[in-house]
Image (cartoon, rainbow, N blue to C red):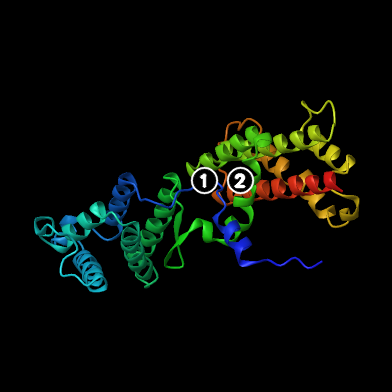
Amino acid sequence: MVVFDLFSKRKKRAQSSVDDVFQYEKISQKLRTQIVHIWNDALGSYDDFRGYGHADAHESYTSLVRALRREYGVFCLVEDRHNAKDEFHELINFFLQEEKIERVLDVIELSFKLIAIRAESGRYDWADIGHTAIKELNVRFREDSTGYQFENEQIMRIDSLHLHQQNILPALKILNEKRFSNANEEFRSAIEHQKNQKNQEAIADCLKCFESVMKIVLTEHREQEIENLPASKLIERVFRAELIPKYLTNEFNSLRSILESGLPTVRNKTSGHGQGAIKKNIPNAMVDFCINVTAANINLLARASDQNASD
């Protein structure tokens, strides 16, 4: 029997309501103000614009305003000319007051594109300033739970990135099921810690979520005395109970290796024990890895287990 992936099915999937961990509908005043502070560091302050600092500030703000006026087909970005006594105030007031999120993102993209280009211009004083500004912008987006990031000189929605679309969102959809309510809280807590760069707490919550999902699935398959088992023993039970089908054994040999030595080991070596005299610095990339490995394991285990139960 041939099953066609019809347009109506694809549209329904695209419109399915899964609560993301980011929002995409507004740029808060707090975030806008933080971005203005970044501009002050990277493009120059009002004093710089007036000529008391580096000469680049006047050129930067003037070029941004003139480009936006031309693109929008207006002579001034703000209606009240009292808020546009010069290009610096015109840009700032437009950015803080504009209601259309698309235009707010236009300003962010154009300004940070300018910062990125200058960072790569070869001038030693622009390189560190520019890279620091872009890094802070993406941190501020994440802290504010706003689902955008600046990458390759463009503003991109987080949910348009392949890994988020194919990994994180499906895991959130699974965890939204009532049976996974505790694991859902733990996974979202891990992402909240990730946003705030509390990296040890993020990794610890990843493991809690992973263990919770295993316990829930094992309980549904009538496995007993699992409540106090560590991750390594839960993994053994998952395979012993054949929750992942036998015919996929070879394909999941590598998975078993990841499950046994990946997430639990990362947690044990970073956030699972006391730090001692030296504070451990966990890279953000390690937390990103743990979040995505957790999501992948949730997707794999829940779906394979459900398939096994239906066979």
Asked if residue 38 lies left or right of residue 20, the reply is: left
Left or right: 63, with 26 as reference point: left
Residue at which label 2 appears? 172
Instruction: Say which residue appears at 23% left-offset and 74% top-offset.
Output: 70
Judging depth in this view, the residue of 179 and 233 nearest the camera is 179
Where residue 205 appears, as percent x and y from the top left, is: 62, 36
Q: Residue at x 71, y 67 (%)?
A: 4
Q: Is residue 100 above or below residue 183?
A: below
Q: Quadrant of the N terminus?
A: bottom right
Residue type at mark 1? Val
The residue pinned by badge 1 equals 21
Seen in the picture, residue 20 relative to 74 is either above or below; the reply is: above
Query: How many residues crowd around disc 2 within 10 Å: few (fewer than 14), some, or many (20 or more)?
Result: many
Rendering coords of residue 73 (x, y %):
22, 72
Q: Is residue 64 visible?
A: yes
Q: Are marks 2 and 1 in contact (CB under 8 Å)?
A: yes
Q: Is residue 208 visible?
A: no
Residue 80 in the image, given as x and y percentages of width and height: 12, 57
Q: CA distance from mark 2 to mark 1?
A: 9 Å
Q: Reading the chain from its start, which is encountered first: label 2 or label 1?
A: 1
Up/down of 3 relative to 230, above or below: below
Residue type, label 2: Leu
Q: Count the marks: how many?
A: 2
Where disc 2 sits, the SS reads helix
Q: Is residue 303 left or right of residue 250?
A: left
* Mark 1 burial class by Cα count in 10 Å: few <14, some 14-19, many 20+: some
